[in-house]
Amino acid sequence: MSKVKTIAEMKAEGKSPEVFFWVGCAGSFDARAQRVTKALVKILDSVGIDYAILGSEESCTGDPARRAGNEFVFQMTALQNIETLNMYEVKKMITACPHCFNTIKNDYPALGGNYEIQHHTQFINALIAEGKLKIDGGGFEGKKITYHDSCYLGRVNDEYIAPRKVMEALDIDLIELKRSKKNGLCCGAGGAQMFKEDEPGNTRINEKRMDEIIATGADIVAANCPFCITMLGDGAKAKESDVMVYDISELIVQSNNL
Amino acid sequence: MIQQLIFAVLTIVAGWFAFSNFFKIRRNILLGRELEENEEASGNWKNVFLIAFGQKKMFKRFVPAVLHLFIYVAFLFTQIELIEIFIDGITGKHRIFASALSPFYGFLISFIEILSVLAFVATVIFLWRRNLLKVPRLVKSEMNGWPTLDGNLILIGEILLLLGIFTMNGTDVLLQKLDPSHFPSTGNLAVSSFLGPFLFDGLDVGTLKILERTGWWLHFITILGFLNYLPFSKHLHIFLAFPNVYYSKEQRGAMENMPQIMNEVKSMMGLIEEETPMTEELPEFGAKDVNGLSWKNILEAYTCTECGRCTSACPANITGKKLSPRKVMMDVRDRAEEVGKELDKGVALEEIIKDTSLFDRITEEELFACTACNACVEECPVMINPLDVILQMRRYKILTEAGGPSEWLPMFTSIENSGSVWQVSDARDAWTKE
Ligand code: SF4
Ligand code: SF4
């Protein structure tokens, strides 16, 4: 991994990045999600794109606070971010978190933040389509792989195709889950559930979803969201299953040996 | 003459009752607040056509969609017969369209008859699904009592209506031969030309005439009954689905912005000068009751078909939590009805909402189990958004009452103080230095 520059450092050199990478809380602090962040960085490096992050000037987008119902906290962090992004005149952004993606795309405009943001699977798909990212396929031959649609990339923002196209480029013969695309089942983390215990019930949502994944007979489940990855990982542990949970970017890193 | 008079009086009385009840529903819906700027939908005729009229979203589940379509299309086309009944009833004529629409009349009635047979089959299957097969989403706990009875009553009403239609048409076919001067020819009828002779052959003219009238009145009275029944039933969706879909937003990701809070935070951050005027009372944020929800939310509650598609896709409900998005919508409607009834008694709104609220029906346990996954929104065939109600009620708990799950507090403080959802000592870009 080459040195990751902040936008402040880049501006100091008198340059401006082609694309801005929004890392998010999970991607910054969560050990598992950091691996996805680094995978994405490796992909960006391999195609030689000038990108930058906000670094310590980035704050939580506020998604969990807003959906928990705490508008005050949301407004504080969101307005702060918008101030910073506007100051650096950020326009094109990518992120590996569908919650950050949704909040910036759909919640920020009403607060005065207007950006073009892409989820990393959309960005990667475009890189492949433009021929900028060459994929060494065949790395997953004989592996059974399924895909879990996250709610905020899929159902909320209607993106089912880009991640599937990337997996197609990886020569993956996808086994679709019974509940997929529009009907995908949540991993259980959204709406700030990630930060609290479950209400009484007969099972946990992530374990239910893991059951469905195991039922496909898959060795690997591909995902696109750091929270889904945590939830499904926990689900696999609870079910004592050895299904591996990977972000799509990690599959590319594995396949291309980045 | 007597018949015409009874007909007119019945129509006026039933119409007046129905009208006054519909008017109350309109009033109850308008208890809701105005829409905020970013809640407004521009009005979508395409969706009215595709989703309300065309039932597009129903077809996610093919079998019930087809069965429902039979009843729906039969219902639509029977309106032609109803118009005829209406004109006949007022003028005292018999089958006025028979000559007016000849030679298509026989074809038209035949078409309605075939649809009616299909609707009959669908009705029987629906009764079976509800009562014997017990399709899970149709027998969940929130369906106990009236909602279950409601579902069955309407199906039984449907059968009565069909009984009326076929008695009326079947006897008519025979009477056309026996008394052609009073019973103009309808041409061949797809079902009744066979069913009529099969059931009623050999009866004398007098009995046939009585049966014909019985069928005719049964048809008409069932319709009037239906009209007056709607205000108390989930079947209100046959009307409200249209405006509801028209006013529904398709955009999903954004939550309604709260300009009051935004401006306060902006002035705190020194982004704007404007001093927010301090009011005596603490402002109320979010929704505690129907008047805190928007009129669109309440319109949705009255539109809900209680089909339970939302609940059957809800991850919380699937895993045994108490939350059921259908119940949320039913609770909003029940509460709007309750407030409406008190208003009818002359009690002032402030009094009604002082000691009771929507929270008496929807508990925190339900509200805070939601993952905001939008599965309910995706599922709803008439574009209802239960999540929107849940999130507004969460806002009330958190912002106005400073309540909600205590586990969320560290997350809130952490975002506020360190800009991260977790309390961490690392710098945000520590990962770049490894
Ligand atoms: S958004 Fe909430 S209520 Fe709706 S299906 Fe998801 S968890 Fe259930
Ligand atoms: S909200 Fe929609 S999906 Fe849910 S029960 Fe009502 S009509 Fe059916």
Image: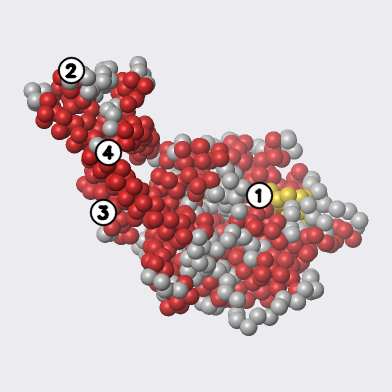
Residue extending farthest right:
A14
C-alpha distance separating marks 1 and 2: 74 Å
C-alpha distance separating marks 3 and 4: 34 Å
Q: Looking at the picture, does residue B1 appear above or below residue B412?
A: above
- Name the amino acid type tagged 2: Lys
Q: State which quadrant residue B5 falls in.
A: top left
Chain of the residue where label 3 is placed in the rendered structure: B
The 10 Å Cα crowd at callout 4, few under 14, some 14 to 19, many 20 or more, is: some
Helix, strand or loop status at disc 4: helix
Which residue is the site of mark 1? A119
- Name the amino acid type tagged 4: Gln
Q: Residue at x 49, y 70 (%)?
A: B288
Q: State which quadrant residue A6 falls in.
A: bottom right
Residue extending farthest front:
B1
Q: Give the mark nearer the N terminus: 3 vs 2.
A: 3
Q: Residue at x 67, y 63 (%)?
A: A61
C-alpha distance separating marks 1 and 4: 69 Å
Residue B265: x %, y % from top left: 71, 72
Q: Are marks 3 and 2 in contact (CB under 8 Å)?
A: no
> Colour scheme of this structure image?
secondary structure
The verdict on a common chain for dots 3 and 1 is no
Q: Are marks 1 and 2 in contact (CB under 8 Å)?
A: no
The reply to whether residue A194 is visible in this rendering is no
Residue B405: x %, y % from top left: 49, 74
Along the line of sight, which residue is nearer the eye, B432 or A212?
A212
Q: Tell me the tag on residue B149.
A: 3
Chain of the residue where label 1 is placed in the rendered structure: A
Q: Are marks 4 and 2 in contact (CB under 8 Å)?
A: no
The answer to whether B286 appears left or right of A85 in the picture is left
Q: Residue at x 75, y 62 (%)?
A: A82
Eye-nearest disc, 3 or 4: 4
